Amino acid sequence: VSATWTAILVASVGCYGLKLAGVSLPDSLLNHDRVQRIAGLLPVAMLTALVITDLFDTNDHYSTDLPALAGLGAAAVALRLRQSLAVVFLAAVAVTAVIRAAT
Amino acid sequence: VIPSATDATSEPVGAEPAPAATRAIARAAAGIGLYAAVFGFAFGAVAVASGLNVAQACVLSVAMFTGASQFALVGILGSGGSAAAAVSSALLLGVRNAFYGVPISHALRPRGLRRLWTAQFVIDETTAMVSGQHTAHGRRYAFWTTAIALFATWNAGTLVGAIVGHKINPANLGLDVAAPAIFMALLWPHFSRARSRAIAAVSAVTAFALIPLTPAGVPVLAAAAVAVAAGFAPPATEEETSRR
């Protein structure tokens, strides 16, 4: 079994285990202030880091991808205008694709 | 991210929602399904561009079935990160689903074996849909219509995206920005809180600074460490919300 398959299977079983724990464990175990705070902050911190590395990281070197930045700018405008996820998605993808095709 | 716990016990049991309410739920679920089809397509194409094969992309969407973790895993593997960093990032991002289990259990009260299949569908979108409902029936209906629509379209989208991804360069279609755009959309509501904004800013600076210094995946794990460290300290003033 390749390293990729191992990573896929281990991470999938683990993610399912987390979901199952959530609907199985007694509330009292998950209802701690500190635990809830950390759980609430984890996605905020990690999703931010993923956006940063998606935009500025190419093989551990800094890079700037102007069409992608413009696409994210369009997504931000769509969010600001309270558009749905589908519109946010399409704005980002379309702006990036059009700029790449034009340059 | 954590929706407030619902109090399913405080209402008449078996209250039937109006047909209009049911239709509104179905419409919202269909909208989520449509977006998941497109987002799933982007995932399949990006996964294949990151070096996975079609089967691996599809197994992720069926078995992991939680978008942010899937994108993190393939992103880190694709940029040459270690399997350990990829798996830990996927798992840490999946931690939030465990906490969604609390309001979902209150709403659906799954017992015994039912927990085994209910659990797989406890994700951002189903939790958000359940938290918007005010009757026991409405919550159950919202959960399952969203779960079925999303699972079907996310997986169909992944399969088509993975197959097409072999023939096209996803970057030409701008599909590589799909994940960061959706991540930003998930972050957006948090930015109204000063504490979340501060965490996001520190995480962004930390991740950016680590890009040339560490292997792929480590900047994201470092951001997780920022969240844990910040979460240990109680908020300075209880929920300092912004003035907007």
Image: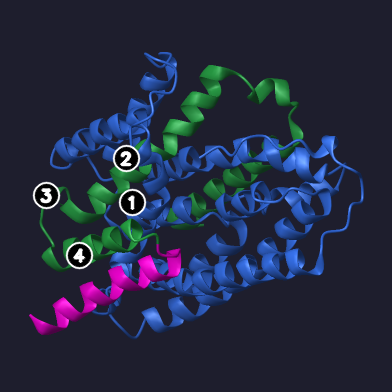
Chain colours: A green, B blue
Residue at point 32% right, 64% down?
Answer: A78
Q: Label 2's element?
A: helix
Q: Is residue B123 visible?
A: yes
Q: Label 4's element?
A: helix
Q: Which residues are magenta?
A: A83-103
Residue at point 15% right, 77% down?
Answer: A100
Q: Is residue A14 left or right of residue B14?
A: left
Numbered badge on residue B137: none
In this view, the residue in front, B97 or B35, is B35
Q: Chain of mark 1?
A: B
Q: Decide: marks 2, 1 in contact (CB < 8 A)?
A: yes
Rendered-image quadrant of the C terminus of chain B: top left
Amino acid tagged 1: Ile
- What's the CA distance linking mark 1 and mark 3? 14 Å
Both on one chain, marks 1 and 3? no
Q: Is residue A92 left or right of residue B29?
A: left
Where B160 falls versus A66 (above or below)? below
